[in-house]
Amino acid sequence: MNKLLITFFAGILIFAAPMYVDGQDLHRSGSTYSSFGLGMPNDYRGPHSGGMNLVGTAIFDDRISSTANPALLGTNRFTNINGGFNITGYSSTDESGTSNSTHIQANQLQISLPIYRDRFGISASLLPETNYNFRVYDSGILEEDQTHAGERLNYESEILGTGGINRLEVGAGYRLGRLLYVGVAPSFYFGTLERQNDYSIDSEGFDPVNFTRKTSYTGFGGRVGLLNMIPGVVNPNDVLAIGATASMPVSLNAERRVETQRGAEMITIRDSDYYGERTIEYPFDVSFGINYVVNNFRISSDVLYQNWSSYEPFDFNENVDYIDRFRIGLGTQFSGYNPNTPPSFFEDLIYRAGISYDTGNMQINNETVNSWRASVGIGIPTQQRTSSFNINFDYGGRGTQAGGLIEEEIFEIRLSFNLSEFMFFRPRFR
Amino acid sequence: MKQKNTTSPEFLQAKLSTTPSAQHLFNKFIAVTLLAVFLYSCDEEGTVGSSFTSDDAQVNATTVEIPSTDEVSAPTFSANENYVSAGQYDDMLFGSQKVTALFQPSLSPENLDSVNTEEATAHLDLKVDELYGDVEETTDFTLYQITRRWRGSAWRPDSVAQVNTISPLGTATYNQAEAEDDRIIIPVETFWVEEFAAYFNDQNPEEYRENLFGFALMSEDAEKIVSFDVEESRFVVNNHTGDEEDDGYTDFRNVGYSLEAERTDEHAREESSLIYSTFENFMKLNFEISDEFIGTDNISRAELVLYKDTDLLDQTIESNHRRNTADLLDVYLLGEEDLELAIADEPRFQASFDEDKGAFRINMTSYIREQLLEDSPDPRRFYVIVGGHYGKLLNTALFNHNSEEYSPRLLITSVDPD
């Protein structure tokens, strides 16, 4: 198992780390709504909470770590590594028609260590905070006075967005007393949003033109978290957990440059001095969650608030109004595993389901871009039931065709692994 | 109810056998991931989202005027081109011009087996291409013997052929309306044909080159200058044997022209430059390609535009006269030290005259985009000449930097990020 952990850790670092630094994307394009601001916010913070369509503020599990609440690190008893991928398909419709796109993206990568089991734990994680990936095609007509051709000409353009904001976070959680956990997690935000434009004029003698806007962001932030366990609320075996987190606003230093490709070289045509250095305020957020566990069943809910109304984008001419965002979810998890009963593959699995509603963080043409999701998932645990492989399926919708906007149908598969074992533990034999 | 023995080896083995090991899970994780990657649907293109995605690209059409131009001259050659000219014409704008065409038939046996020394007659058969001057008047041409060796490879417009003007070799009259198949037929004196026959039948090019130099065609009438298509012209020999197969023709070993010109600036304007295809006067464009000069980096199309002073050309020629059409512009990219060699260099750009716009438009997009990548500007400059060295007199007038409305300029279409 140790060899497996080492192999996995090395493989994931080699494979996944460059994706995070280079914008997370493995392939193709995502939601067109991610073209605004810093991209679409990411919410899933753990292999188990994702299956329940929740952030996971109060979802504790000593075998599964998450980045939902730093206070949860104090509950860990196992060394844990988790990570995974999303494959998301979008079917987007507006007044011009329908287009389909698919996007593959790496999820968070986290390693956590219990320094003192069920008292003090630490973790390091790398997770995508926003997704900025889209592909938009456009075509139209240039009037006579827009070129020197003396006639109207057709043009085609493609705008490709890649990247997003990432968060590199270290966290620590500690149990105060018997049932109260606190946590803190400073973090470093970084990322580059690239917006590549390929433009061609349909006439002999006109060369295609391309340029890429690269906007880089860096900043420091942090979160604090609380988790309170209340056992025996209804049943002697049950536990009610109440969790809360708060993150501070992040002042992101933003720089932009524009490059164009000439042959094999990228040439800078607008350097950062042209735009000047700016400070972009990434909004603060607070979340609140409850999680009720009895035997192999749990039900949980959480709500997230992000202060996007105070956000001002780098591009002042964006035709979008940013609004405060609320996200609420309800999910459940069940496993039929019983060590005292005959083995059964299906009973040993972990089943998850959940729904969520998100008001979104933007208004375009006076229309709010809200979304909803429903998810189901299964966890396939190892024989020791410490590690698991998780598959989650999401279906949802975002936006509307009113106001000339896009209505999206979303299909998502999330594949994640969760590896846990006792490390630095000398077994004792009788 | 009897409890199952949950600690028995059989029970534990059964339990373990249904629960995947970590290695098995790892294999499944990779397999499902790969399967999912290959199963996902392909992107389908569409314009969804284009209506509200912010417009990144700004298409701009800008005009950059060439700050200054100069008139320069350079030597050129005037032999063995596609055309050759003969005649005289007094042009109101370009001055008086007298052109003498020089021909030296070749000894090629390709289309002629032999020349009957005693019976053969020959004539110069010239295909008329264009007329420059009074197209209606009849013009007399006279053929004279060239009496000194001349080399086509080194012949210049201001070179002077040594000619026997006392004893003409032949004469012809040309009127466009009457000419059959638009050709001029000029019989050649038999004594010259006899001399030619001796060299031809012996196939002795060295002796021929040293002793028989061809003929010069000129006109004393100042009505027109006629240009001939060399490819379609020939030296025809009739052996008078009764068998047509014994007749034949040769092409020319050397063809060239000499020009005597008295230029005038009586009708010239400050806003336009007179351009001569003989390289006596052509235009230099003074500008450097740089970001500051062009004003943008993302060029989709860049055109150099030069306008013909059509009004000046039309106002300085009589209604029944005509000038050779100068419809092709050659643009050379040269250092000043290379001007002397310009005629040996191919033009960097060529452009045809656009009648609708009254201008020559040269697409320089690739060159300017390359130059914008360079660390330092190209020290060479553009030199503009019309028609090039084809053997016709193609004179024209182009607006220069002094013209407010039609100065040379770059038309730039760019797609800028903001």
Image (cartoon, rainbow, N blue to C red):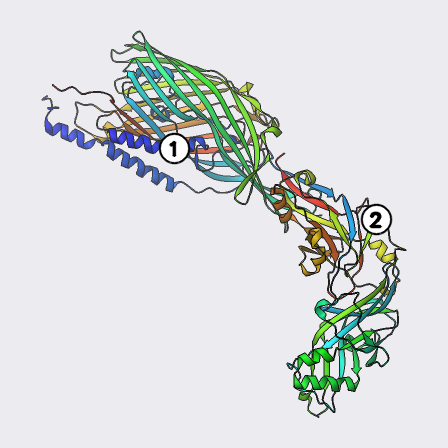
Mark 1 falls on what kind of element?
A: helix
Specify whether residue A290 is in view: no
Q: Is residue B168 above or below residue A126?
A: below
Specify whether residue B395 is in view: yes
Q: For marks 1 and 2, give the CA distance.
A: 67 Å
Q: Which numbered marker is on residue B254?
A: none
Q: Is residue B368 above or below residue B98?
A: above
Taking A165 as reference, is A229 left or right? Answer: left
Taking A280 as reference, is B308 left or right? Answer: right
The disc labelled 1 sits on which kind of residue? Ala
**Which quadrant of the figure contains the C terminus of chain A?**
top left
Of badges 1 and 2, the one in the foreground is 2
Occupied quadrant, residue A402:
top right
x and y, in percent, of residue B172 in the image: 83, 79
Q: Residue at x 67, y 79 (%)?
A: B206
Q: Chain of mark 2?
A: B
Q: Nearer the viewer, residue A120 or A286?
A: A120
Check disc 2 and report the residue beneath it. B271
Q: Label 1 crowding class (10 Å Cα cut-off): few <14, some 14-19, many 20+?
A: many
Taking B293 as reference, is A97 left or right? Answer: left
x and y, in percent, of residue B155 in the image: 74, 67
Mark 2 falls on what kind of element?
A: loop
Q: Is residue B113 above or below residue B416?
A: below
x and y, in percent, of residue B390 in the image: 73, 65
- Tell me whether marks 1 and 2 sit on the same chain: no
Residue at the far bottom in the pictured view: B242
Check disc 1 and report the residue beneath it. A16
x and y, in percent, of residue A428 in the image: 16, 19
Occupied quadrant, residue A112:
top left
Q: Label 2 crowding class (10 Å Cα cut-off): few <14, some 14-19, many 20+?
A: some
The disc labelled 2 sits on which kind of residue? Glu
